[in-house]
Image: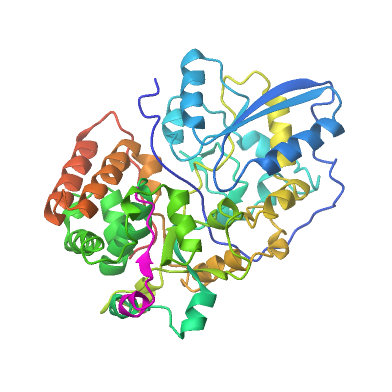
Amino acid sequence: MLKRLSVFLVLVLMLAACSSNSAGGGESGSDSGKDGGEINLMMFEGGFGSDWVKRSAKEYEEMNPGVKINVTASPDIHTQLQTRFISGDVPDIMNPGAKVDIQGLISQGEIMELDEQLEKPSYDDENVTWRDSFIPEQFKLQKDGKTYGIPTVFGAGYLWWYDQKLFDDNGWELPKTWDDLEKLKAEAAKKDISLFALQGMHPGYYFYGFYLPLVQKIGGVKAVEDAFNLKEGSWKSEAFLKAAEETAKLNPEDYLLDGTLSLSHTDAQTQFFQRKALFVTAGTWLEGEMQDVIPEDFKLRAMNQPGWEGQSDLENNAAPITSGWGGAFYIPSKAKNKELAVDFLKYLSSKESVYKMMERGLASTVKGTEDKITSEPLSSSLDVISKSNNKTYLPTSINDSYPELANNLVNKIQGLLNWDVSPEEFVKYAEEKAGEVRKDDSIDKVKFDWGSN
């Protein structure tokens, strides 16, 4: 049943300036859980953390005597969820992470529809529906016109992160083009600093954070859109081949920190924060994930990938955002206590709860919480989006829709960096795997439309 339960990561970024109609009472939207009950919540433990969920669960229990909320958080929650779904002993709420094929579970009828509940009052204000309490641009977890997930946290797509202090101290400017990047590499080498610390053991970081954004810079958003729509020949197009050639240069031309291809994500990021490399690619979870190792004088900031010579400013400023499916909260259709699960999710998406989440330097999908953003790194990532002129695309959405295809390509790109696979072999392989999906009638096809024309 869970053949498609697999691979990779998460979430959407694009803040809109919205106002809130909150009454601030915190009780008007809560209408269940009064008679007690127990729910089990299983969630992915990553850079966004789980502490805010556990704190909210404890407070909810205190407000509703007799209610018990068990929170299980793990970086390997996908394996535990697989076992639970196979046995039929599903949790009441789950936050699956990107390695779970949530859309596959929805297609199999394993996830509860939430539209009816979303038209009821929100937790903060009985005059505002639960649906209308969210920033609309962030609330797009629909499949076939039905809503299944509650997006509490959103994050940037894979941006490039750097230390503004290091650049200021050395009089360096951020690279605007790949030619600028080459010049910066030479300057950094004089200080024994590499350009990149890549999370070598986890090739998804450079597939989504380096390769696909480079395809977009070279061929425009339409090049990526066509490939995700499985258009014949798109995965071996000129943009994909040229991006593969540039990606393959990273290792032999010494763009990378020595030994970076054998580093875990936290090890690579630690060396970045030790100022051994100028850039690391990650999402907005980076600050929270590495908060214990970030030096006090480190000015962490985000930037878009440098533009491509000859490409339009509109395309060069286009911003990658994440789709949000893996990072949302869901109620399995076979959950034992759906009513209480819905009520707790209402509380979890209330301002009172999301403010706890935002203490980690995270942004919320809930309206009226923008003014609580105090993190300069997070603000810098929002600046990337604001400069995109609404030209955005979703690199990680290929994993949401075709996880097996995404997993194959993520694994193959490691060979590209190691020079075990040539650029020509890589794009040929990608096209072949995309063709297999195109011809497989058992796989639901998704239409991607990011307004590329």
Residue furthest top as drawn: 87
User: Residue 421's x, y, as percent?
Assistant: 15, 49
Residue 70 horizontal side relative to residue 440, left or right: right
Residue 39 horizontal side relative to residue 9, left or right: right
**Is 196 part of what is drawn in magenta?**
yes
User: Residue 216's x, y, as percent?
Assistant: 31, 64
- Quadrant of residue 436 in the image? top left
Residue 314 horizontal side relative to residue 61, left or right: left
Task: Evaluate whether residue 320 shows in this view.
Answer: no
Task: Evaluate whether residue 99 shows in this view.
Answer: yes
Residue lying at 56% horizontally and 26% vertically, measured from the top left = 332
User: Residue 345's x, y, as percent?
Assistant: 69, 37
Relative to 310, residue 30 above or below:
above
User: Residue 137's x, y, as percent?
Assistant: 56, 56
Residue 426 horizontal side relative to residue 8, left or right: left
Range of residues picked out in magenta: 185-200
Camera-side residue of 161 and 78:
161
**Is 242 part of what is drawn in magenta?**
no
Residue lying at 12% horizontally and 50% vertically, measured from the top left = 425
Residue lying at 31% horizontally and 43% vertically, measured from the top left = 406
Camera-side residue of 187 and 399:
187
Relative to 390, residue 288 above or below:
above
